[in-house]
Image: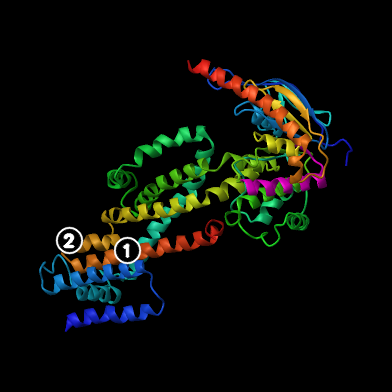
Amino acid sequence: MSIAKATAAPVSTLARLKCVKPTPEQIITFVTLSILFSVWFEVTRREIVPKMFVPSPADVWNGFVETLTVGYHGKNLIVHTLVSLARVLGGWSAACLLAIPLGLAMGQSTKIRAVFDYIIEFYRPLPPLAYYTLLVLWFGIGEFSKVLLLFLAAIPPLTIGAVEGVREVSPAVIQAARSLGATPRQVFLKIILPATTPMIITAMRISLGFAYTVLVAAEIVAATEGIGWVVWDASKFMRSDIIFVGIITMGITGIALDGCIRGVAKRLLRWKYV
Amino acid sequence: MHAASGHVAIREVTKIYDPDGVNVQAVDNCSFEIQAGEFMAVVGPSGCGKSTLLNMIAGFESLTEGEILMDGEVIASPGKRLAPGPDRVVVFQAGALFDWQTVLENIIFGPVTTGAMTRKEATETALELIAGAGLKGYEHEYPIRISSGMKRRVEILRALINEPKTLLLDEPYRAMDAITKAVMHKFLLDVFDRVHKTVMFITHDLDESIYLSDRVGIMTTRPGRFKRWIDVNLPRPRDFSIKKSPEFLRLKKETLELVHEEAKKSFERGEREGG
């Protein structure tokens, strides 16, 4: 019965998709996802792997319902998600405000680059957990050290993106602007800024991804809320269903955030895609 | 407007690049004048210092020796260099439109940026120029959507709107296909007949240099100096048929021989340096 249900659903969805003529790629994506889902369904239905490790789709669904109604450790899933989003967006926004102007300055002045380049290049490849211990030692286990960790993780992609963006602005374009009478200040505002925008937006997307990957690490230490903490805490109680709920939630919010940036980018960069 | 506006004088100008203690002399004791309203073409082998000369007039490069005057006023000397400005607008070989601005926005960039015109005035003037250049209907397109020939026309309009005293064109039609080039030549000739600006046009296309200009300066290999000046007394307005006239062919033969001599010298020197 349940198999019938599982196969019936994709067919009817496909039928509906046919009205809008899906591209071959969309069909491939859809089929891939369907297969993955079916495998998951079958593996758990036959209990090939113990439920403790891989929950069934139904378990995960119930996990969602439970965390959205009763909550997890007293807090609703939405609250956990919002707390995490606030941390990620807080750290990332602060990083954008600092690192984009810094990167633009580094891109234009070799002296400014000489000051910051090696500092950023040194800590960039470090695993965030390595220096997180220091941050906790210095700033305690409160909110500040968490946001600071996300902030630090978000910086390098932004500065690198901005520096490369500035370097890629064609010298002829800058000379043309100066020849047309633009002052150095106007060259920065009217030429360098718009010319580097595509690169900076890409850097912002990568940076947000970085901050996101560090989230669980930031929430492991002495937290009582947040989606990363939920995943970590659930693992201690073998609640694989809750782990799945947490991971799926993170995945969806991640895609949504990236979609927001892409939406803004599409409007800002009309000149590139029309 | 001054009657003699746009007269450029280059006096004993030398340019030595000194990047890492290795002196490279790009321009050697070069003197010439471009009369107000004259179309002067400069031809010469690659690396002969043509662009360096143009960049010194434009204000992008400093002088090692000598001075450059515009309408009798020194605008550049070893200790002094006037910042690049809309009185000496440059159009570059690689193309330098602002991709994030529409055709119209590109054209009004100069006067709006310097405050010479209000946005409204600039827009009106630009729309006239656009219509005159056969670009009507494209004013709100981004550069990525228009052809290379259109881009070049937009770049020239973007320079013209500033009412520059001189137009400095640095091989603007390099790497263009023959048809586009022919269209661009016609466009530039028409523009020149209308506005009569002083023009310095760098190229290594001999045909083009004679077809467009009043005078062709032929430069030597590095260190660059002028080898010969050839007056082009072909009547204006000109069109394509003039290229078949005996006078045109005679001029072409003359310049060709001079340039060939230089090319040979440059080749032989290269052989020696290589050996």
Marked residue nearer the N-terminal end (1 or 2): 2
| Callout in the foreground (1, 2) | 1
- Three-letter residue code for mark 1: Gly
**Residue shown at 14% from the left, 70% from the top:** A43
Residue A240 in view of the camera: yes
- Three-letter residue code for mark 2: Lys
Cα distance in 3D space between marks 1 and 2: 21 Å
Range of magenta residues: B178-199
In which image quadrant can residue A250 be found?
Answer: bottom left
Query: Crowding at label 1, few (<14), some or many (≥20) Cα neighbours within 10 Å?
Result: few
Is the N terminus of chain A in the top left, top right, bottom left or bottom right quadrant? bottom left
Image coords of residue B31 (percent x, y): 75, 22
Which residue is label 2 attached to? A236
**Residue shown at 75% from the left, 58% from the top:** B131
> Vertical placement of B33 versus B128: above or below?
above
- From the viewer's perspective, tell me whether residue B75 is left or right of residue B103: right
- From the viewer's perspective, tell me whether residue B103 is left or right of residue A221: right
Residue B9 in view of the camera: no
Q: Is residue A61 magenta?
A: no
**Mark drawn on residue A251:** 1
Image coords of residue A124 (percent x, y): 35, 42
**Chain designation of label 2:** A
User: Magenta part mainly helix, strand or loop?
Assistant: helix
- From the viewer's perspective, tell me whether residue B208 is left or right of residue A31: right
Q: Is residue B197 magenta?
A: yes
> Vertical placement of B61 versus B141: above or below?
above
**Chain designation of label 1:** A
* Residue sitting nearer the eye, A152 or B247: B247
Q: Secondary structure at mark 2?
A: helix
Image coords of residue A247 (percent x, y): 27, 64
> Vertical placement of A199 versus B205: above or below?
below
